[in-house]
Image: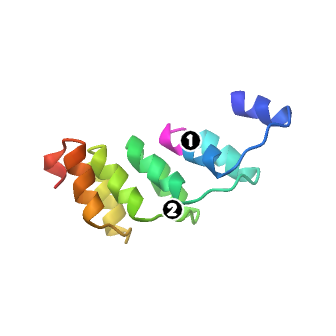
Amino acid sequence: EVLQWARAQGFPWNEWTCAAAAEGGHLEVLQWARERGCSWHPRTCEGAAQGGHLEVLQWARAQGCPWDHFTCTAAAEGGHLEVLQWAQEGGCPWDEWTCMGAAKGGHLEVL
């Protein structure tokens, strides 16, 4: 409702709007924003992974949202093993930062 009000008042939005919705796990807000032309970038997938919101990440990817190695790093740092596994199975790139993210977050079980 707040985002709807802000848009009705003419407040601008950009790809960070979608990223914030994804990180908060607000799938309906993300869908609403995208239906109205709000742009997104890999930070949307990263935010969903960081918050452990697999459903949001799955929806974003199904809609063509790009991702990068930061998606896996965010999932690992947050200890979201299911999200990390899904991303890796889907071909999301990852590198040594993914392992460092797991260690930084204290999630050795993710390693």
Residue type (three-letter) at the residue carrying disc 1: Ala
Residue 2 rendering spot, x and y as whole percentages: 70, 27
Q: CA distance from mark 2 to mark 1?
A: 16 Å
Disc 2, disc 1: CB below 8 Å? no
Seen at 31% across and 43% down, the residue is 78
Q: For this view, does 107 lie left or right of residue 58?
A: left
Residue type (three-letter) at the residue carrying disc 2: Arg
Give the image quarter of residue 17: top right
Q: For this view, does 14 lie left or right of residue 9?
A: left
Q: 42 or 33, which lies in front?
A: 42
Give the image quarter of residue 51: top left
Q: Is residue 68 magenta?
A: no
- Identify the magenta region: 20-26
Seen at 49% across and 42% down, the residue is 23
Seen at 45% across and 53% down, the residue is 46
Which numbered disc, 2 or 1, marks the residue closer to the eye?
Answer: 1
Q: Label 1, secondary structure: give it.
A: helix
Q: Which mark is residue 85?
A: none
Q: Which mark is residue 61?
A: 2
Q: Is residue 29 above or below residue 99?
A: above
Q: Residues within 10 Å of mark 2 (few under 14, many from 20)?
A: some
Q: Is residue 22 magenta?
A: yes
Residue 76 rendering spot, x and y as whole percentages: 28, 51
Instruction: Pick the quarter of the image with the C terminus.
Output: bottom left
Confirm whether residue 55 shows in the render.
Answer: no
Q: 11 or 110, which lies in front?
A: 11
**Residue that label 1 marks:** 20
